[in-house]
Image: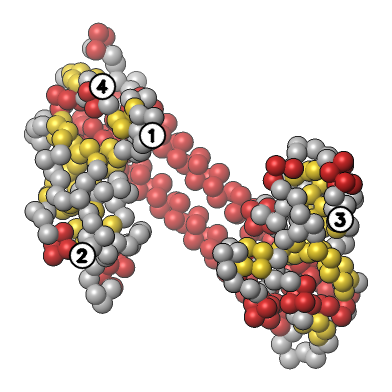
């Protein structure tokens, strides 16, 4: 016997339509938030942060987007402030259900509350609607911005056990939600700590504190080659390996021996595209912000890789991974940022990169530094890759138990 079955022993269970247990209209609405109203809007501000601000930004939520990420004051709202529990369904094509309890002003949402607070727990109704979110999604209509068909949604059957059973289900799911949120926060904090530790040791290893070390400009100890232009539409599933500059920010780490994308051999030969070979460091030379520029990836593939014209390949006698790690330091970026041109797209040319001084220890010391940073890189990467999987696993686990807890016997079998 499941826990839900135990809860239902001796308890009545009714099936009602959503329209019978709630009312949905715009009676909750204040005014349409204007630019003036949203001046004090802050995203993802915690309660602790709110209390610490010297200038209060208000404690009234703006529910205009359904994200509950806005705050305002009565003076800015210039409207009657609403109080109470609501479920919101924003327009836009997704059944992005939200629950809120407090004071608020709103426009643009469909808002619902219980028709009888003595019989119905709105949080219970909210959790049940989440469990049938795909059904609600199917009732969105429109060719442009989609809107929910409330006549269909309000006709959805809702299982209504006695109030004490609703309360117990809410308690269990709130506890599960809190535990999931705590775990996610802990995993995220662990990843942040490891990244900070990694960054600290990388900077320390390249500072050579108290040790006399030779430093040379990159342009003196090596050669830069700029890639040639190709576009994303040229890239195919197999062929000659290639690196598009945009992939340097989304796919490649400190080193790589396989490419994500490929080009046809005919295109490479007809355009005389340029290739980085094993031991070269591919350095990205364009991006949306100054901080994006200059990151390098050591290419260790058996065959060469075509590079985009917003990238350079750098060839030297240094350990390529040592150079790639160096391009990710603050020391390197502090040197090159004065040579970066800013605009819609920030960029740097070879002359700017050539001027950056790199410390040149012995080959053995380069290998030692690379070995240490490789271990940090593996650890951080494994956490970075494992974190989303772990969070997704917890989310699925939560949804599984929520749906299990909210799967009631059908009306005809009660």
Disc 1 to disc 3, C-alpha distance: 45 Å
Q: In which image quadrant can residue 345 be found?
A: bottom right
| Comes first in the chain, label 1 or label 3 | 1
| Comes first in the chain, label 3 or label 2 | 2
Task: Give yes or no for contact between labels 1 and 4 (Cβ–Cβ under 8 Å).
Answer: no
Residue at 20% x, 39% y is 111
Residue at 13% x, 43% y is 28
Mark 2, mark 1: which one is toward the viewer? 1
Which residue is more in the foreground, 147 or 249?
147
Mark 4 = which residue?
A: 152
Q: Residue furthest top?
A: 412
Determine if residue 36 is in view: yes
Specify few, some or many for label 1: CA neighbours under 10 Å numbering under 14, 14-19, or 20 or more.
Answer: few
User: Whole-percent x and y of residue 42?
Assistant: 32, 62
| Comes first in the chain, label 4 or label 2 | 2
Mark 1 = which residue?
A: 144
> Secondary structure under badge 2?
loop
User: Whole-percent x and y of residue 286?
Assistant: 67, 64
Residue 92 in the figure: left or right of residue 257: left
> Secondary structure under badge 4?
helix
| Comes first in the chain, label 2 or label 1 | 2
For residue 58, which numbered disc appears in the image? 2
Specify few, some or many for label 2: CA neighbours under 10 Å numbering under 14, 14-19, or 20 or more.
Answer: some
Mark 4, mark 2: which one is toward the viewer? 4
Which residue is more in the foreground, 281 or 181?
281
Mark 3 = which residue?
A: 275
User: Whole-percent x and y of residue 405?
Assistant: 33, 28
Disc 3 to disc 4, C-alpha distance: 59 Å
């Amino acid at each position: 016997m499941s826990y839900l079955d135990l809860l239902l022993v001796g308890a009545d269970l009714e099936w009602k339509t959503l329209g019978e247990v709630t009312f949905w209209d715009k009676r909750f609405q204040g005014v349409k938030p204007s630019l003036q109203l949203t001046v004090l809007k802050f995203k993802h501000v915690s309660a602790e942060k709110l209390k610490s601000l010297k200038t209060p930004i208000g404690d009234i939520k703006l529910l205009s987007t359904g994200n509950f990420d806005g705050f305002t004051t009565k003076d800015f709202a210039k409207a009657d402030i609403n109080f109470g529990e609501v479920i919101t369904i924003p327009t836009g094509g997704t059944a992005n259900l939200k629950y809120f309890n407090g004071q608020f002003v709103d426009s643009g949402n469909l808002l619902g509350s219980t028709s009888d607070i003595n019989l119905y727990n709105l949080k219970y109704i909210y959790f049940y609607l989440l469990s049938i979110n795909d059904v609600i999604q199917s009732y969105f209509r429109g060719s442009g911005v989609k809107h929910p068909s409330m006549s269909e949604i309000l006709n959805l059957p809702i299982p209504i056990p006695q109030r004490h059973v609703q309360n117990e289900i809410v308690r269990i799911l709130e506890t599960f939600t809190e535990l999931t949120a705590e775990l996610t926060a802990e995993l995220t904090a662990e990843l942040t700590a490891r990244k900070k530790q990694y960054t600290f040791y990388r900077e320390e290893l390249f500072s050579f504190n108290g040790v006399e070390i030779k430093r040379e400009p990159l342009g003196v100890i090596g050669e830069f080659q700029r890639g040639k232009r190709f576009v994303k539409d040229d890239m195919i599933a197999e062929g000659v390996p290639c690196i598009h500059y945009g992939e340097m920010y989304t796919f490649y780490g400190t080193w790589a021996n396989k490419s994500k994308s490929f080009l046809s051999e005919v295109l490479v030969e007809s355009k005389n595209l340029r290739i980085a070979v094993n031991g070269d460091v591919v350095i990205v030379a364009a991006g949306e912000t100054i901080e994006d520029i200059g990151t390098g990836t050591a290419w260790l593939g058996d065959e060469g890789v075509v590079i985009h014209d917003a990238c350079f390949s750098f060839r030297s006698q240094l350990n390529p991974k040592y150079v790639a790690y160096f391009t990710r330091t603050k020391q390197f970026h502090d040197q090159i940022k004065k040579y970066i041109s800013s605009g819609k797209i920030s960029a740097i040319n070879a002359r700017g990169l050539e001027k950056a001084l790199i410390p040149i220890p012995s080959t053995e010391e380069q290998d030692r530094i690379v070995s240490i940073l490789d271990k940090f890189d593996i650890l951080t990467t494994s956490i970075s890759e494992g974190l989303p999987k772990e969070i997704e696993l917890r989310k699925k686990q939560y949804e599984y138990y929520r749906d299990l807890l909210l799967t009631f016997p059908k009306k005809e079998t009660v």
